[in-house]
Amino acid sequence: MEKKKNEMFRLLLFFFLLIGIEVVQSSSHHHHHHRSHDYCCSKLFVFGDSYVDTGNSRVSVSRGWHKPYGMTFPGKPAGRASDGRVFTDFVASSIGIKSPVPYQWINLGRPELVKYGINFAYGGTGVFDTQSSYPNMTVQISFFQQLIQEGVYSKLDLNSSMALVSAAGNDYSAYLARNNGTLKGLPTLIELVVNQLALNLKRIYSLGVKKVVVNGLHPLGCVPLITALSSYQKCGENENTLVRFHNLSLKQAVEKLNNETNSSTFRILDLYSAFMSILSKKSNTGSLKFSNRLEPCCVGIDSAHACGSTNENGLNMYRVCDNPEAAFFWDLVHPTQEGWCAVYSSLQASLEQIY
Ligand SMILES: *[C@@H]1O[C@H](CO)[C@@H](O)[C@H](O)[C@H]1NC(C)=O
Ligand SMILES: *[C@@H]1O[C@H](CO)[C@@H](O)[C@H](O)[C@H]1NC(C)=O
Ligand SMILES: *[C@@H]1O[C@H](CO)[C@@H](O)[C@H](O)[C@H]1NC(C)=O
Ligand SMILES: *[C@@H]1O[C@H](CO)[C@@H](O)[C@H](O)[C@H]1NC(C)=O
Ligand SMILES: *[C@@H]1O[C@H](CO)[C@@H](O)[C@H](O)[C@H]1NC(C)=O
Ligand SMILES: CC(=O)N[C@H]1CO[C@H](CO)[C@@H](O)[C@@H]1O
């Protein structure tokens, strides 16, 4: 019991780790397989947390402002909770557009900045309020709605747009933090989170976006924060049970939305299966590529420090692996660029069905 409790305490640390990083305008246009899409998608609108944030969060005290974040791309800390590109960048690239500009950086005097859509996601946030002071998903969608009301995007623009929505678990870690790791109310919370998420998806659709894609929850029990308990040998079952409930509930909610709108507007991307196909020992696609599957590339020198932290003399209190390309996880909760690339590849077929 004590052990389980400790495990859940680690989970609550997610919140502190789903960080925001200083931004640098990046032209992350690296894949170049431009295709002409008559209908989908000329713009990408992104909502959620650090799994998709490309530079909105700007907390100066955040480790993410510091090296070694961004070391692979763009070569310095740049608003992403990774060594390089995150999921958003790969999705944008696959539809043949530039990664949409972070909301913090829009300038309505320069329409070319918002041509590919906008990224409204803030690291650390949830569908409900977390301990993060950044806008929750409801508020992120309100920012979007306001820009539509101001005429920044036309109905036609929205008609050929896609939304990408990520709720990667901050609501759960915030709950655990508030309740000292007590699991009791979690089943109820999962229902509430999924219901609110479904309302958010519907709202994005009602604003005119015709393709609304939501990430399923990835295996929370397999992130290094949790696997550290077993010296990076095995995934935590409690967390993955939570994920199963969330995903099941989300699947039902999304089916209902499609049913209600007589459409196939709403799609789930199965990040759980994508992560697992890479992390699973049996998979040769995964294990050959990554020598480190459950162990992060960048870690604090001890449990009081995390990737990116320094001491009062400015000395680095973390270690970075020699080859981030060989690691799936970058820090205790976020994949490396190479990790996201593998996740994207595994989801590419389901993404292309959407386009
Ligand atoms: C989101 O944040 C706003 C502003 O702080 C708050 O009024 C609202 O209740 C929050 N929404 C949810 C769903 O938690
Ligand atoms: C939006 O796209 C659909 C499908 O291509 C088309 O039938 C519809 O007329 C378009 N609506 C507008 C307002 O452009
Ligand atoms: C959590 O623990 C703190 C300190 O032990 C206590 O003050 C607080 O009431 C507890 N909160 C809950 C929700 O149990
Ligand atoms: C979808 O709608 C049909 C009726 O239009 C209903 O019979 C069915 O149960 C609905 N399915 C879901 C998942 O809501
Ligand atoms: C969906 O289709 C059914 C039957 O074709 C129709 O009665 C219903 O009004 C449609 N609902 C929406 C939201 O378009
Ligand atoms: C749609 C989705 O993401 N489903 C996943 C939810 O999580 C379970 C594991 O508990 C996976 O098996 C599903 O594929």
Image (cartoon, rainbow, N blue to C red):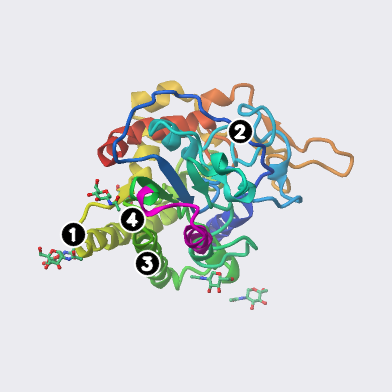
Say few, some or many: other residues with alpha carbon within 10 Å of mark 3 (under 14 / 14 to 19 / 20 or more): some
**Mark 3 — residue?**
199
Comparing 133 with 334, the one in front is 133
**Mark 4 — residue?**
247
Comparing 31 with 324, the one in front is 31
Say few, some or many: other residues with alpha carbon within 10 Å of mark 2 (under 14 / 14 to 19 / 20 or more): some
How many numbered tags mark residues here?
Answer: 4
Q: Looking at the image, do the residues carrying marks 1 and 4 touch, with CB atoms under 8 Å apart?
A: no
Q: CA distance from mark 3 to mark 1?
A: 17 Å
Q: Amino acid at mark 4?
A: Asn
User: Any mark on residue 262, and which?
Assistant: 1
Q: Looking at the image, do the residues carrying marks 3 and 4 touch, with CB atoms under 8 Å apart?
A: no
Q: Is mark 4 within 8 Å of ligand 6?
A: yes
Q: Mark 3 or 4 closer to N-term?
A: 3
Q: x%, y% of residue 137?
A: 50, 61
Residue drawn at x 28%, y 41% as measured from the top left? 354
Q: What is the span of residues highlighted in magenta in the rendered image?
A: 140-156
**Mark 2 — residue?**
26
Q: Mark 2 or 4 closer to N-term?
A: 2
Q: CA distance from mark 3 to mark 4?
A: 16 Å
Viewer-side label of 3, 4 = 3
Q: Tag 4, which secondary structure?
A: helix
188 above or below 152?
Answer: below
Q: Is mark 2 within 8 Å of ligand 1?
A: no
Q: CA distance from mark 2 to mark 4?
A: 33 Å
Q: Is mark 1 within 8 Å of ligand 5?
A: yes
Residue drawn at x 34%, y 36% as measured from the top left? 347
